[in-house]
Amino acid sequence: MSNDDNDKEQLSFSFRGQSVPVTWSAAVSLEQANMTLVSKPFRNWVQRIESSKSSPGQRQIQIESVELQSVDMFGARGVGFAKIKSHCKLQITSNSSQEAASEDVTTTNLPGICLLRGDAVAILVALFCTEDDTVHSLLVEQPRIPIAQVDCLELPAGMMDDDTQTIKGMAVKEMEEECGIVIEDPSELIDLSQLAFEGQKVGADGIPMSQGGCDERMRLLYLEKFVTKAELDQMRNRTTGLREEGEVITLRIVPYEDVWRVSADSKAIIARFLVEQLRKEGKVPDPGKLATPLLEPTLKLPHTAGNIRMPQLAFGCYKVPDSSQGEEILNNAIQAGYRHFDTASYYNNEATVGRVLKRSGIPRDKFFLASKVWNDAQKEGRVRESVLQSLEALDFGGYWDLFLVHWPVPNHFIETYRELELLQQQGKIKAIGLSNFSIDEYETLVQSGIRVPPVVNQFEVSPFLYRPEDVEYFQQKHNMIVSASKAMHRGGALNNDVVQAIAKAHNVTPAQVMIRWSLQKNLVVLTMSSSLEHQRQNRDVTGFALSDEEMSRLDSLTDEETIKARVALEEERKKSM
């Protein structure tokens, strides 16, 4: 259908209260024309021109008409690219006073051929190798027809074509689709564009990439990750992309310092500059301070439906105060990468934990949260009331991933466990665990006829208090997870000569050696530190491994007297409750 047909349907859009006529070429169908006018790229283009005025309003652009010359569709996603020819005028008002009786307005025709494709997001990735202190970056290699290049290297990037996604949400999606990297927490991404141009009318919402011909504005984000050599090798030269949509992508690992030079990619050049400039201004932390491990070690919860996984690196909330100081400690833990938080009603900080986690903006299902029912609630028959109070205090998601019997109070722990079974049936808790249960107490519980097997027993385990028979009994014989409280032991454990020597051999801290020992025993490890630096160190334990000989040396640090003293203390505590 030509533009000259008298019966051709008329299209228009509103601009500053006026109707602007729209025509379209024979190459564009009426359906495509209508879809273009409601597409995100076209709407953004119109809105930006409407709001574009020079201060204090002396110069502005007026759209007189628009011709849609061609439209390319992206399958079911709708309009991909639209080439338009707009008839625009630049209006110049000679008198800037808004109260003037008359104003002299002149107009100048403006060329207005535009390729509308919408905004995009690109991610500069810094990969810190934990084994040799090298820093790498990730580029995608793919054919790019417009620049006649079969092996174009550039930052991972994608179009902002989903109205339901946030900027960081789109970046997360692109990293998974193009690079196979899953980012559990979007807050790990730093929005360089917003930081650099905050408060400016151009830049904060994206950096224009081709001002003379294309509407695209690029949001540049920055991500840091700790990786091992094995993980780098897995990514190197891997093929990815949505092949059904013509994406033929190969991942390339390059030195971070050279990412701009080897790619000649404008996105990489600008992103590198912004990171360094913002770092000088104190808006981006020093290299590596934002990094979290690429992989989070987890264990599948036994005896549960589905694939519920429990992060092995847990933040223990014992002694986290119910105060602003406690909030700061927990905020640091989230920033360090912790997603498993272990608290208890006895700790009096469940509300603080819930408040901080909720404010983080990270979805509830990205956290694994555990609490415990204290002894007085067991003795007084208030188990249900206590758990519901814990839920009310948490006020985050309406459930606990794991709820434990804090201590096996004599003559009460079986009744307590059965109350937890009912609460699990009602969806208040997803799994039930034990804490400080001996083998005899566990067998008494099981023989009482409980319906739901416990998934965890949490008790003190470290190289200085290692009871291999107990650990193996719960892990091997009854398919339970053992959660190690006091994984750092106490007193001068970190100053022990054996621990110090092994730490020196691996160029890590004594605390990292203790945590790594627990991981290699397949334990969940509870640690607590108020320092963000120490919290990050406590999580940076996947980049090295202890030898069998080193594990044996650490095993030998436990002596029989320590075990006897601990068993006696536990028995005394249970009797005094």
Image (cartoon, helix red, strand yellow):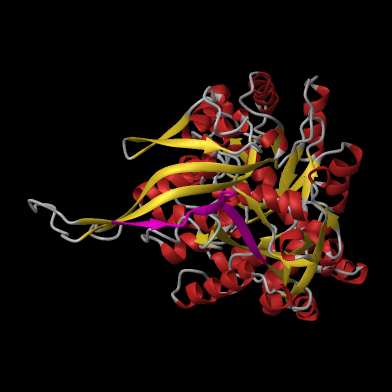
Q: Quadrant of residue 554?
A: bottom right
Quarter in which the N terminus is drawn: top right
Is any atom of residue 118 visible in this view?
yes
Where is residue 428 drawn, in percent x and y? 61, 25
Left or right of 134 in this view: 168? left
Q: Is residue 422 magenta?
A: no
Where is residue 8 drawn, in percent x and y? 54, 25
Q: Magenta: predominant secondary structure element? A: strand
Query: For this rendering, which residue is in front, 553 or 505?
Result: 505
Provide the residue span drawn in magenta.
Answer: 107-125
Query: For this rendering, which residue is in front, 250 or 217?
Result: 217
Query: For this rendering, which residue is in front, 21 or 182?
Result: 21
Residue sitting at x 48%, y 36%:
22
Q: Is residue 432 above or below residue 86?
A: above
Residue sitting at x 38%, y 58%:
201
Q: Quadrant of residue 138?
A: bottom right
The mark tally for this picture is: 0
Q: Is residue 226 above or below residue 362?
A: below
Q: Is residue 411 above or below residue 128?
A: above
Residue sitting at x 46%, y 69%:
283
Left or right of 283 in this view: 201? left
Quarter in which the C terminus is drawn: top right
Where is residue 387 drawn, in percent x and y? 56, 28
Is any atom of residue 488 visible in this view?
no
Where is residue 103 drawn, in percent x and y? 15, 54
